[in-house]
Image (tube, rainbow, N blue to C red):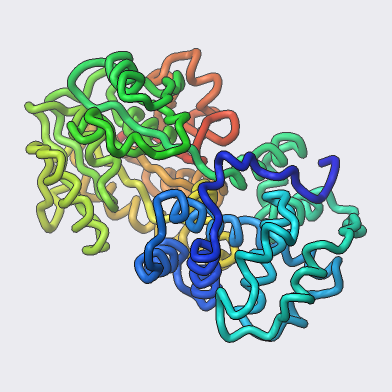
Amino acid sequence: MNSLWPTPLDPSHLGRPSRRAATAAIEAHVAVLRGEPLKASLATALREAEGLGGQERRFAALAVRELSRHQRLLDLAARTLGHPPGKVGLTEDQALLRYALWRRLFCGESWARIGPEVRLPGPVRPRTIKDDLLSKIVESPLSEPPLPESAAERLAIRYSFPNWLVERLAALHSEPVLEALLAALDEEPSLHFRVRPSGTRAEVLAQLVEEGVAAEAVELAPDAVRIADASHRVFETKVMKSGRLQVQDVGSQLIAEVCRPLSGSLEGSIVADVCAGAGGKTLALADMVGTTGRVLAGDRSRRRLSQARERVRDLSVRNVSFPHPLPIGEAQVLLVDAPCSGTGSLGREPDQKWKLTPKAITDFQATQLSLLEEVAREARPGALIVYATCSLLPEENDEVVRGFLEKSPGFTLEPVAPVLGAERAAVLCDGPFLRPIPPRVPGGGFFAARLRKAQG
């Protein structure tokens, strides 16, 4: 970490800034500060904004995520300039100040560019910060403040994470690995897709090139594709509209792959996706079991399960059903993608890092262990349970698996590596577990373990 203050982003990745886009971004951030989820706040702000073009919407969405993503560092910059957050009375003022400092520090802009986006009589009211004060904050020299001696706390400040979370990660990783991980979680996530049947990934990539979309294979997962084109034109392509591509993180694709038997194929199997959520892994498993297999999907959240039903219907997938209660005893393979802290997905949901607490991690651990034990009781003899999370913390991963095995003598832990092969396992596995961690693996951080129930 050479400097506390960042190198500005590539302007081509920003979209198009404007006064209306700034208004939407700041209003959404105000809603986040008042406790609303970032995704919902952004959706509301964009819906209420009139006349925003596609590139303006893209800028507003990026800005909202960035204001949460870099919240701690932006507030330190404000303090260093003599305007600590506690001195700023209104939530609207706090959001406005963060926006102006983000445009300065992370976009490299001057008041000449920032001013038209935020000058009175807008973009957000009520407001007590006058234009002259805001311009002074943007244009005044910014010195390097004194930093704590603790390496973990320095990194927590630079990459805007809570101290407690970085301290837990620091116990697992060396300082260079930890810094790379935090930096990766601070990046705007790339778009990753899974290529769906039928045909090959190479054919889909060729079709994308024909349609003018830059894309490349991600070799760590057999069907993964990264979109290098920042315009999001991929969603308008024929290959996307034909159902050949599904948005899915690389680590999420790997979890579905870990559900395979050592023989290499799930074709014809019955698989239960116990915590199906919005159905991303459900669809991947449906493609893996083929027309002769079945996927049984369930989730405790009716809202999320309705999203899964809709995705299954939109893609005309016919081998997925949603029975209630879920007949767990029918499945040869059970995926338990348990509710978790989402610490591996903070690149996509940066507001969550300010909502998480150590107590929440303890609560998640209790829920995860209880859920795993419940599924294990109903699983048929010989069944494979794949336990998975999108958490980086051992409390939700290794410790849950160990606690389960201590209470469940009828289960054994199977290593993941033989399913993936030695070359990929060297990058993706940690002992018996799947543990893809950014930036070594693109996208978010994930975990999976294979648990086998004894026969008879």
- Judge from the rendering whether residue 168 lies leftward or rightward of residue 442; answer left or right: right
Q: Nearer the viewer, residue 310 or 353?
A: 310
* Residue drawn at point x = 35 percent, y = 29 percent: 258
Is 244 rendered above or below residue 323? above
- What percent of the width, then of the height, locates residue 440? 58, 29
Q: Nearer the viewer, residue 27 or 203?
A: 27
| Quadrant in the rendering for residue 335 | top left
Residue 68 visible in this rendered orientation of the protein: yes
* Residue drawn at point x = 8 percent, y = 27 percent: 291
- What percent of the width, then of the height, locates residue 55? 45, 49
- What percent of the width, then of the height, locates residue 104? 73, 56
| Quadrant in the rendering for residue 209 | top left
Q: Quadrant of the N terminus?
A: top right
- Judge from the rendering whether residue 214 lies leftward or rightward of residue 70; answer left or right: left
* Residue drawn at point x = 33 percent, y = 52 percent: 373
Q: Nearer the viewer, residue 3 or 352?
A: 3
Is 100 rendered above or below residue 298? below
Residue 361 visible in this rendered orientation of the protein: no
